[in-house]
Amino acid sequence: MVGLKRRSNIEFAVSQAFASEVILMGTHSVLEDLIDLPFQFREVHLSYSAPEYKESCERLFKCPVLFDAHETSYIIDDRFLNLRLPRSNPINYRIARQHCEKRQKKVQSYRHDDIKVRIQQILSANEGRSIDLEAMAEALNMSARTIRRKLSEESTSYRELVNLERKSRALDYLQNSALDFESIAALLGFADTANFRKAFKRWTGQSPREYQEQQGRLTATPLD
């Protein structure tokens, strides 16, 4: 059962009945589009009294509709929950999952005051802009010496974190964009494509072109 609860600090410009029915019909349409089959709830529970058009509700939702319920909710039959999604895109799923996992790790690390994640967050937000240690120290409101010490305690360095961020962005661009190598090099802050190729070879043991060929996605212009 999925319950729909109203937050106390939100005021609807329309009636509760109208808002609930719009949300439910929208959910119904989205689910039907996802499974690409006719869909119906098993039951719909509405927390308000039955309106004059109550019979129309059952025709719209194609299932029993119970009024004066404890909360507005709906039940989905197991047969729909176990269906494979015919319109799913494995590439988009992989990208979205990787993005969510990366963000989740950052949130968890922030809770533990992880200086590495704080630095990576700032580097990520300043794509293409070179941030030296002194500028990072100012952004974090601490001395460069303190940053070096804290990173050393975690067996890393500021230069290594900068390179990790560059590598992460390079892999993302090569896998998920149609940018050529020259554009990628510029976005990562390299002076030219040759320096980008050398750095990428050092990071991965492959040239950018070899990496794309291995991934089966050669979308960039081969300059190496």
Image (cartoon, rainbow, N blue to C red):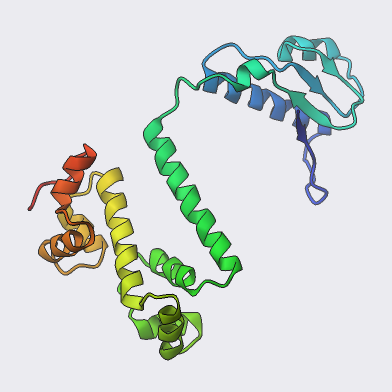
11 with respect to 158 (left or right): right
Quarter holding the N terminus? top right
Horizontally, residue 220 falls left or right of residue 4, namely: left
Note whether 216 is above or below 203 in the view shown.
above
54 or 221: which is nearer to us?
221
Residue 173 position within the rendered picture, expressed as x and y whole percent measured from the top left: 28, 50
From the viewer's perspective, tell me whether residue 205 is left or right of residue 158.
left
In the image shown, does 28 or 119 lie closer to the viewer? 119
Judging depth in this view, the residue of 99 and 54 nearest the camera is 99
Query: Which picture quadrant has residue 61?
Result: top right
Answer whether residue 219 is visible to the viewer in this image: no
Residue at x 36% of width, y 77% of height: 157
**Rendered location of residue 95, percent (x, y):** 40, 42
Q: Tell me what residue is drawn at x 16 percent, y 41 percent.
A: 213
* Residue 147 is at least partly visible in this image: yes
Residue drawn 67% across the image and 14% down it: 40
Rendering quarter of residue 212: top left
The residue sitting at 89% across, 27% down in the picture is: 69
| Quarter occupied by residue 108 | bottom right
- Where residue 149 sits in the image (x, y, percent)? 43, 86
- Vertical placement of 62 versus 160: above or below? above
